[in-house]
Image: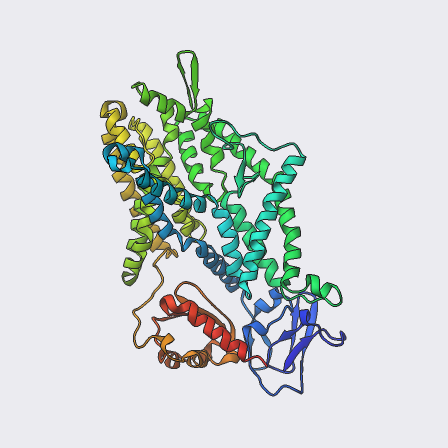
């Protein structure tokens, strides 16, 4: 067996050994430490396994992509490293989002069964058992949406972990709890815990309750950041071995947990210091927005969408919708403050709607715009993928329109295609301004609810015919803009990857793992193996050894080659095939 050790270090330790089964005489550089290859005389096999690379430093190991004819290490070009990192990040984000199409359908069903507007039209919905079922569906699914940051934390950590993913998930969940608690304790000790308002709760305070813990409101961004930290730390510490008493207490994945205790506490406590200035900067913009006419209104809609991944969008719309900044209305001896309270009071008292209703218009893009986004994604998908893409996106668009919950679609492209995300924010702001210019004073949030309320308020008060004409225009504009950008820039939106139809027998119905490994150049040629929803993803030492003819014996839907990275499309069986290949590679280690 060929192993690496630090020159002059004596017998190598597990946490600093690199098993490679390759050239017996080889030097590589890992940071400032040089390692030399030596041959173990007891080894007669020369097999390679991506899991045999053991904590030389993961960053150094990640740079190794193969050997040249002289036995020298070839390093991955910097551009490929960036692409690799972005690809892994994009894959990791998709892990929790995979469940949202089904969740969206159930959420919409629950919203319909509990809709007060529909209950007036369909009395059977008032029947207690039906109402109970609706409440169960709606509330059980809303708790998933409300804790999206927690899901991202666990899902990203699992996707990034190279081994024992279940341990990474447990550490991520414990890290999330510690991070939330660290933020709560810091706020409490500093006397900064906000008191919830009777009407708006903690909205607008910069704080939120997550898993029953009041802490800084980092939104989904906090979960994404902690998930990335957990995955990075876990991969670099999970194989650390100590000797003596510490070997039982802190070795292996337990050492990864110990490291994450410090990281979680630092991030949770630190958020109480670095996040409030960001929040105050966003809050300061609200005064500028209020005093800037249509330009301010555009900025309002633009920021309300743009800042969704960070959770800071609450600080944009809350002051207008729930404080006097959005308008006030004196009714008898009481005063209603905030665009929402004023709008509902004017509706109940049959009064003309005031100018402040424009601050309620962020719901317009949720109700209509996401149909255009989904249509563009479906249209730009490859022809063979359109049905599957539509099955995934249509429920999410309906959820956005009926329940005003857009995160499931947002996170499909806000990171992977930031150009589209900025365009989305621009269009959202522009249409809010257009509603004001066209003198629309109608309800825009929740398709069914707003339709019934607009009909009951009348066209004279709301100008709702113009609203629905603009809605059709918005859908068309979103479709055209997104389609042009996706095709012109070849953006990685859902359904864009090629997945030809499979031919032949099901690869899981016979022992084909050996054939797959041989087609990839043998076990010694495979540096890493992973999977996404439909693809086996491998990194090869030498792409020239790839044998597509051999791989064709095992049914697949296509091969995508990107340098030394190869993706084989197996459909929904990719995960099972990847697991079988990994087990075959593990068995190859001597």
Which of 154/441 is in front?
A: 154
Res 90 seen here: yes
The reply to whether residue 564 is visible in this rendering is no
Image quadrant occupied by the N terminus:
bottom right
Say whether residue 370 is left or right of residue 47: left
Residue 313 vertical position relative to residue 525 in the rendered view, above or below? above
- The quadrant where residue 330 appears: top left
Can you say whether 97 is above or below 465 in the image? below
Identify the residue at image location x=49%, y=51%: 151
The quadrant in which the C terminus is found is bottom right
Left or right? Give the position of 382 relative to 70: left
**Quarter assignment of residue 379:** bottom left
> Residue 321 falls in which quadrant of the image?
top left
Q: Position of residue 560 (x, y in %)?
A: 39, 69
Q: Residue at x 29, y 50 (%)?
A: 375
Residue at the limit of the structure toward the top, as seen here: 333
Point out residue 244 in the picture as x, y percentages from the top left corner: 76, 67
Task: Tell me the residue at 61%/82% (across/down).
Answer: 23
- The x, y position of residue 84, in whole percent, is 50, 63
């Amino acid at each position: 067996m060929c192993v690496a050790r630090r020159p002059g270090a004596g017998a190598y330790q597990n946490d600093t050994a690199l098993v490679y089964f390759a050239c017996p005489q080889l030097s590589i550089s890992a940071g400032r430490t040089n390692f030399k290859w030596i041959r173990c005389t007891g080894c007669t096999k020369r097999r390679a396994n991506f899991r045999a690379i053991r904590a030389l430093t993961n960053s150094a190991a990640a740079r190794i992509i193969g050997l040249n004819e002289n036995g020298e290490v070839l390093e991955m070009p910097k551009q490929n490293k960036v692409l690799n990192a972005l690809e892994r990040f994009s894959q990791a984000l998709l892990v929790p989002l995979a469940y949202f199409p089904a969740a969206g359908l159930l959420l919409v069903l629950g919203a319909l069964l509990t809709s007060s507007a529909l209950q007036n039209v369909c009395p059977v919905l008032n029947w207690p058992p039906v109402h109970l079922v609706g409440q169960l569906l709606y509330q059980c699914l809303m708790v998933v949406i409300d804790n999206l940051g927690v899901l991202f934390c666990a899902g990203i950590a699992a996707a990034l972990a190279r081994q024992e993913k279940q341990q990474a998930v447990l550490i991520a969940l414990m890290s999330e709890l510690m991070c939330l608690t660290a933020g709560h304790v810091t706020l409490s000790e500093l006397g900064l815990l906000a008191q919830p308002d009777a009407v708006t709760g903690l909205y607008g305070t910069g704080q939120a309750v997550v898993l029953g813990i009041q802490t800084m409101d980092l939104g989904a961004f906090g979960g994404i950041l902690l998930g990335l930290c957990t995955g990075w730390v876990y991969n670099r510490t999970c194989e650390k071995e100590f000797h003596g008493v510490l070997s039982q207490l802190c070795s292996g994945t337990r050492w990864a947990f110990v490291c994450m205790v410090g990281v979680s506490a630092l991030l949770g406590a630190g958020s109480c210091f670095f996040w409030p200035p960001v929040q105050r900067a966003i809050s300061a913009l609200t005064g500028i927005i209020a005093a800037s006419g249509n330009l301010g209104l555009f900025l309002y809609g633009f920021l309300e969408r743009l800042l969704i991944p960070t959770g800071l969008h609450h600080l944009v719309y809350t002051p207008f919708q729930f404080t006097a900044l959005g308008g006030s209305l004196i009714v008898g001896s009481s005063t209603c403050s905030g665009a929402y309270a004023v709008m509902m009071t004017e509706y109940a008292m049959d009064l003309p709607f005031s100018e402040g209703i424009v601050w309620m218009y962020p719901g317009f893009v949720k109700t209509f715009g996401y149909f255009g986004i989904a249509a563009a994604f479906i249209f730009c998908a490859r022809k063979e993928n359109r049905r599957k893409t539509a099955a995934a996106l249509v429920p999410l668009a309906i959820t956005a329109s009926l329940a005003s919950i857009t995160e499931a679609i947002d996170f499909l492209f806000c990171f992977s295609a930031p150009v589209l995300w900025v365009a989305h924010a621009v269009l959202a702001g522009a249409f809010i301004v257009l509603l004001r210019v066209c003198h629309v004073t109608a309800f825009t949030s929740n398709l069914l609810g707003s339709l019934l309320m607009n009909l009951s308020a009348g066209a004279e008060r709301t100008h709702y015919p113009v609203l629905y004409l603009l809605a059709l225009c918005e859908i068309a504009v979103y479709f055209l803009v997104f389609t042009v950008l996706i095709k012109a820039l070849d953006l990685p939106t859902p359904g864009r990857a090629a997945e030809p139809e499979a031919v032949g027998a099901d690869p899981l119905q016979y022992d084909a793992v050996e054939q797959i490994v041989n087609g990839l150049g043998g076990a010694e040629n495979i540096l890493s193996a992973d999977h996404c929803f439909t693809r086996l993803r491998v990194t090869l030492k030498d792409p020239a050894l790839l044998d597509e003819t051999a791989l064709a014996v095992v049914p697949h839907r296509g091969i995508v080659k990107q340098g030394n990275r190869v993706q084989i499309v197996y459909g929904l069986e990719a995960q099972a095939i990847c697991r079988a290949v990994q087990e075959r590679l593990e068995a190859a280690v001597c």
